[in-house]
Amino acid sequence: MPVPDPRGLPPVEPLCETRRDPLTGDHVTITAHRNARTFLPPAGECPLCPGGPASEIPDARYDVAVFENRFPAFDARTPGVPPAVDGAAVFERARGAGRCEVVCFTDDHSAILPRLPVSRFRTLVEAWADRTADLSALPGVAQVFVFENRGVEIGVTLHHPHGQIYGYPFVTPRTGRMLEQAARHRASTGGELFGDVLAAERAGARVVLPGEHWTAFVPAAARWPVEVHLMPHRHVPDLVALTDAEREEVAALYKELLRRCDALYDTPLPYVAAWHQAPIGEGRGLVRLHLELFSVRRAADRIKYLAGSESGMAAWINDVPPERQAARLRDVG
């Protein structure tokens, strides 16, 4: 049953819209209300700590908690918008329907994720799969994205250990490119792109963590100074499709991968952990579930900034050879 909110906050009035870039075909989301979202509050005012005066979670304690984001990028309640910007058909426009949720990994504000027990990671996998199933069933949701941003260098606005889940009303540009590449590969070779990539990586020098059901590796064409992919050995489109054995193993491997990433520079690594899942209505046999974890830290005291080539032309330049980084991640184990 609903729990009364004693904070006296104004009602949520999301204003989400998407505009399509006519030069690239990409969707860009405009959300003016998110500019007022909570920004690095002191620990005593953290909205993710349980039961406090500013808390989104009324319980006195919890293991894992999931709730709807108060400052969503996409929301089914957002009002309708005209179909074009300035009435020009070339500037397509739509309401930003969808859903955004927050996933709290622990009720301990100062906890460090890789130091939590494997059982907590197992609970997280179950929560991600459960929410993926529910969001995938919502009208208008085309793709579900599970992710975590960690570290001020990445741009987090809350220090409490947490991640997010987006239910996009469109297929994201990155996934769209994967679909195109996978379809092209199947047409030219008859093979499954992700399976062929995984087989080549498992036979190479960039494997970090081998498992019975999963392998973690630094990709041959890594964009980021620290970049690791964690991929299942069989084709599954999303977290929902994982077996119990696959869920059990990925919980342990993910914890170990995060521990090794933190050991690289003897300090918590700023990173984005992105779970790529197949879209809901297309490409279920083409895009394989996998984790992409990457960091902007290129040395203990240096950050990789996305400058002209990356930001202006999406042409990546990586100063750290993938083979060297894979060796370092093996060594810190």
Image: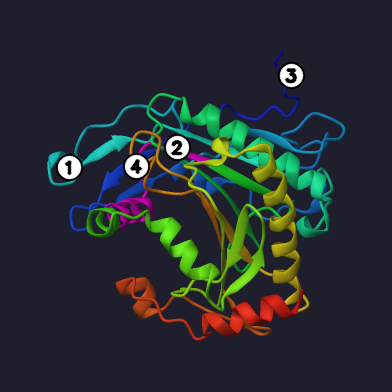
Which quarter of the figure has residue 264? bottom right
Q: How far apart are marks 4 and 3 (CA)?
A: 40 Å
Which quarter of the figure has residue 57? top right
Q: What stretch is highlighted in magenta?
A: 166-183
Mark drawn on residue 3: 3
Residue 182 sits inside the magenta stretch = yes
Disc 3 crowd rating (10 Å Cα; few below 14, some 14-19, many 20+) is few
Helix, strand or loop status at disc 1 = helix
Sequence-wise, the earlier of marks 4 and 2 is 2
Does residue 165 lie above or below 159 as drawn? above
- Residue 62 shown left or right of residue 265 in the figure: right
Q: From the top left corner, tell me how far across and down residue 95 is, in percent.
A: 33, 33
Colour convention of the picture: rainbow
**Residue type, label 3:** Val
Q: Are marks 4 and 3 in contact (CB under 8 Å)?
A: no
Does residue 12 lie above or below 203 as drawn? above
| Residue sitting at x 73%, y 19% | 4
The quarter in which the N terminus is drawn is: top right
Disc 2 crowd rating (10 Å Cα; few below 14, some 14-19, many 20+) is many
Q: From the top left corner, tell me how far across and down residue 287 is, in percent.
A: 40, 48
Mark drawn on residue 86: 1
Helix, strand or loop status at disc 2 = loop
| Residue sitting at x 55%, y 71% | 218
Q: Name the residue under label 4.
A: 283
Sequence-wise, the earlier of marks 4 and 1 is 1
Q: From the top left corner, tell me how far across and down residue 246 is, in percent.
A: 65, 45
Helix, strand or loop status at disc 4 = loop
Disc 1 crowd rating (10 Å Cα; few below 14, some 14-19, many 20+) is few
Q: Which of marks 1 and 3 is in front?
A: 3
Sequence-wise, the earlier of marks 2 and 3 is 3
